Image: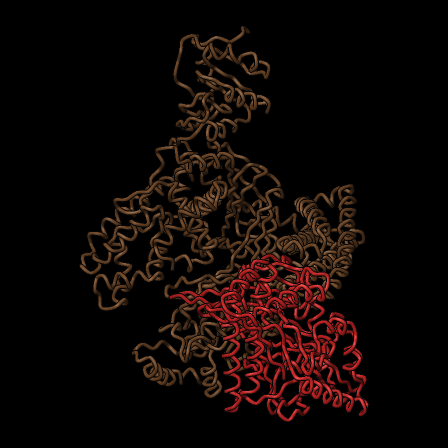
Chain colours: A brown, B red
Amino acid sequence: MIELKSLKEELKNRLNEMLKVSYKREETIHVEDIRYALYEIENLINKILSIIDELKKFPENVQQLVGPKFIDEISKTCEGIDIAIKDYINKVDDIFESDKVRREFVKYLEMIRKFSEDKEQECYNLRRLLREKTKIFAGRKIEYLRKLEKRVKDLRINFEELEEKSYNLITDLERKKVLMVSPEILDLVRSSELGGEVWAHEIVEKVSGLRSVAGEPYTEEVSIAAPYLHEEEPTRLTIDQLLARYPPFEPIQIEADGIIGRFIWFLESTNIVFIHPKDIQRRVDESVKIDEYSGKLISIKPLDVLKDVQNGEIIIRIQAGFRKVFIKYGSRELNNHVQKYGASIRHSIENIQDRYERLVQKVKGTERAYSVSNLGYSWYCILGLSMSTDPYDLDCPFMSECPVGRKSQGRCNKWSWSRRLFPKVYVVPERELALTSAADPKYGRPLLFITPFAVSGVRMHELYRRAQWYMPSVTPEGPVVEVYFKKNLKKDLPKTNAICFEIPLSLIKAIIESLLDEKIPGKPEVTVMYDNNVSLDKLLLSKFFVYIMTRKGLDTFSFFQMKDDKIIKNFEQKLQKSYNQDEIVNFAIEIFGHTLAHLFHSFISNSLEIEPENLLYVYNIDKKRDALLVSVAENSAWGSLNIAKHAEMKFGTIDRMLEEFVNSITKSLEKHEKDIQSYVMKMKKIITDPTVTKIADELKNRYLSLVNNGIVLDTAIFLNHIVISGQDIDIARKLQLGNVRELRERLTDAVVASGISTCIDGCTACVMLDHGCTAPLIQNIVLSRNLAAWILKVLAGEAPIKGRGNVLGSAIFYQARESFFAFSPYLDEEGVKILTDLAQRAVKVVLVTRKKFAEEFGEQLKKHGIEVYVMKAPRHDKFYILDGRVRVRTTQNLSNLSSINEFLLEQLEPGEAESIVRRELEGGAVERYGGG
Amino acid sequence: MPLSVTEEAEVSDLLDRVKKLDEEYERYVSPQTPTLGLQAVPGFVLLLKHFALRIERFSVSEYVARYDHFILAFPELLSIRAVRFSGEIGKVSEYSSLLLERFQRKREKGKLELEGSFITMGRLSNVDASLLQMLIPLFLALIRPLSKDSSIFPSPLSFIAHELSEGEQRKVYLSPCSLTAILEKEKFEYKERFPVPGNRFSGFLVYGKALTYKSSPGEIGEIPLKVFVPIHEDFDERFKEYPRGTRTAHLLGMFVFEEGLPVLKPQKRGYFLALQEIPFLPEVEAMAIHGEPLCLAVHTPQRVYEHYCAIESSVEKVDAFVRSVNDKISKFRRRGAYSAVEELTLGSLSREMHDLFKREGDVYKLVAPPLLALAVERASVKDALNEVSKILGELQKLASLGGHEAYLKLSELGKSQLARRVLSTLRGPWKKSFEIQKEYAMLHNLEYLI
């Protein structure tokens, strides 16, 4: 939504700025350059710190070779530098505006330089010493010594780089003129200065932030050059589109000369080795251009496996934890055909297909043969150890390299029977919204304790460090494989807009703690089956358990294959012994924040009618500010959509938007729940096939036995578990079905017929996102629809919550910032402490209580400036008003705080609080204690 | 590797004998009869990586267990074997001797069997036996590698299977021993980062010769031998001088039998890794070849208690052996080879030798090696032997006495702790070890490397 007037104004300003600039690259340094340099320094420091952490894990007598002082000193200094650099990143602009800050900054950099120089030398000496020592035979010690030597080497390299980076930055700052114009404009000026041509639309794009009249936001584009991809010029895509449509490591599903999937591009990664062909590494490096300075992806040129690569195949090995995973792209046989027929292969494909089908029939004895010309499908290992897009790989091509293959004689029986679509590769984004860089956060009126605000001109970064996908297995969601890029891709949105809200972290924590408190009755219920509920806390525990057992979702397989009794045993042991409450609470906060961010993202997208991919969500748990921060930002470099304004136009004010969000979400989630239940009921009636119902009963029993032991799995996980743990065979045998295949075909129907809810705690229709999630493969584990819905309801005052006064009660009371009115007939020491604590934080505290307690504690309270009133007649009701706008209706007195009571939050209209207080104090029912 | 029919017989017989001995040792070592392990090569610990693959229905997991693999010489067993240790690093030192209370072979499903390698379940501790550590050359002299035609076989008394994992799992057999090598000047090849088990060293690969001895005609012969001489400060300083001239040296080292079979043939992989020069003890070697265990048998009504307290051999045979060896070595010296062997034969060891190796009439007697283990915690070997000789004297008397009285006296004698240890160690597996090496050589008509 752009106003023509402001656009014009903006254009004029920007052009004026341009004219003022005299641009000479060697004489100037740009603000963004400094920021990037700082990011790089921060990155290096983090690398050093992680090496130090590793060193700390070595056995002590090995560590002693390095000297504990060495480790301590580095870790202490680096932590200090890390904090300082983060601080400077947030106030880069100050470095230019204030000479003092700048001088200090240079001085600090000099300190870093000196420190890294010293440490580099120390590491050099240390490494020489260690190398001498590693030459003897020393059993396991030698392994550690070698590792130690390598770490010290890494340390040295990092310090060397750090020294160089800080030195360069110092000289730049001292010698060069600093520019504060956007780099895009500089590009324009540079190209016009160089005498190049500049298209008018380029100027308009770059200064307005709009790419077309349709209002597509402008972001940096990547050019992708593949002759067959599109007939004409190299295509230009935004990095989001590129990574979503044509991610690295995945064959591009586009046809060229009748063959699909012949193009692939790779990103150099730390845990990948190219086995074949030998020279491929160089080609891979050449095919991707990344801007060294900013980390932006400039262009890619996907490899044509059948044309550019020797023998037409690429084999890579990925080190995934303990496992080695092999992937083969392309096909030697198909390559031969391509060589033979040349460009006319398109017409010969039918022929080749014919022969291929005969081959498959001969070897496999099956009618089914997939298209020989589609390299987007792959054969795979059912252990998830390898896959191959080569249609001719009817047997595993990695037998000699794979430990399992070596053990099997002749043909490996773990190789798949059929081909499956090549798994979708997800490049995982990590986002950071630099709220401190926002020019003018506009706060709205809080809804109870949720405070909305909008920011414009805020900086945002997206960092792509890794890509992940499921290796296909018996189920399409096999073990997860992750690759870590050597060079991180960065996306920078220097001035974007965001709408956000924050919730006090301490309050969320107290709510979750109350939920997990076993003694507290009346927990919210979650439907897992049409006639079976579990309480939300049990669901949460089970979720945490699955999260832990699957190693944060990355190793679902070893969990799935456990037998039920083993899972149950593990559940009891792990949750009772290995984990403390804090870990579970932190996990719950994390998934609450994440789910809320997803919900907010979809809400903004729907209500403001902005394409989801043009929005980015960020959630942030800020312990220092005691806030859970949820934001949705524009995915545009220059904030051309101006969503804050957009929201204002749509909802009137930003607080109305928040209200609307909370209402619509709680309602739609409730409706979703009802829909699902009715769907489950309906489906149960529709499915009448007797075999299916028999299987359904079996599934139901197994599911119930897990649920009764506290383990709640969603249908996807449950089905995978049934298949992978071999229970499908048990069921088939029990029901005397012909074979397992017969059963597997009916499994999906059966699970519906069994009455297990299709969305227990989140599905793609409610909280999961197709695109842009920061944990794409494990959404079912790290999101919780029920938790988000319930906490939101509590926070919005729509549902009461039971909790202990010293956990939940105090967490609520301590939210008061300005005033606290307490109507509490009873009072004790603990209650007094809350009141005096608040008073010490300059909160105006007024208390109404019984005479007996006023006499007991009155003087003490008055000392802290607390106004105390006594009731003339004994009353039993109690309530509290915070900051003149939140009323807490509760059964909790300011005494006996460990007891369990009910709390309900209530938003008061402006003025309402005042009249309540006045009615209480001036109605004649109370009198001021101690006169006055 | 193709093996000839006879080699196959020798290798399989060797493995059988090693396994038989291992069983024997496993039975013998217990908390009641702990055994002393001397560092056969002090400071030398290998890294043993044990890979295990667990393949389940739809998943596979790999485990790596890491052990320190100590190579130890056991006087009481008259053997060199290895023990695995996976406890805290630094709990036992690789420079000090060990006392072991448990000695267990382990066969795990899905894992390679490692012959000559034992697990201790952490039942081991350091013990100070520096005195005995000096006698390592003497033990090694009793353990002789063997050969036939141009193939070399390890002695069943020094046999260790080790697992290497470079890319894939590989079993190598190791056999620490001593031998006399002739290293000719022209045959030195410098190798950068030559791979040895678990490490890489720079040094010289020498296509040299080793001396052999054929017992029936009593001839000294030669056999081709590939030796790797590492140049590094942790190994013998003298190695640096080697390439300057042809040399005869008595070397302590280790056969590394590659290609998965305990046999070394020229033109194949596998070599002798030299670690240091040690004194040459031809008399003791002669005892290993010609000697017989001397038995003191006590006949009681229940059973016969056999105590093997020495090795005995005729003066004539031993002297003949020593003479021909010396002749051979001096022949090399006359041809211009520098001989480290003669230089080192004398020295500190000779004094100790005096107590251990004696001439009695027309026989030489070498004290049973297990008795040396008793010298731990004693000031000198002589002290230990003096104490032991009393017990042996008693035993001598009992041997001539026999009958019920002998039984009573024997149990009386067993009341002293030292005597009990002496008796049990003399009844222990050392005699079997000693005989098995001889038997093996005799049966297959093998020559001894000296």
The residue shown at (41%, 44%) is A541
Q: Nearer the viewer, residue A459 or A44?
A: A44
Residue A254 percent coordinates (x, y): 45, 71
Number of numbered discs overlaid on the protein picture: 0
Q: Which of B219 and B260 is in front in this view?
A: B219
Left or right position of A268 against A28: left
Confirm whether residue A868 shows in the render. yes
Residue that extends furthest to the bottom in the rendered view of this protein = B217
Query: Image quadrant of residue B332?
Result: bottom right
Residue B162 percent coordinates (x, y): 57, 73
Query: Image quadrant of residue A48?
Result: bottom right
Left or right position of A135 against A306: right
Relative height, residue A175 to residue A315 (above, below)? above
Left or right position of A149 against A669: right
Confirm whether residue A182 shows in the render. no
Relative height, residue A392 to residue A488 (above, below)? below
The residue shown at (30%, 49%) is A705
Q: Which of A147 and A254 is in front in this view?
A: A147
Residue A350 percent coordinates (x, y): 36, 83
- The quadrant in which the C terminus of chain B is found is bottom right
Residue A471 percent coordinates (x, y): 44, 65
Residue that extends furthest to the top in the rendered view of this protein = A931
Query: Image quadrant of residue A686?
Result: bottom left
Relative height, residue A516 to residue A477 (above, below)? above
Left or right position of B323 against A606: right
Q: Which of A71 and A679 is in front in this view?
A: A71
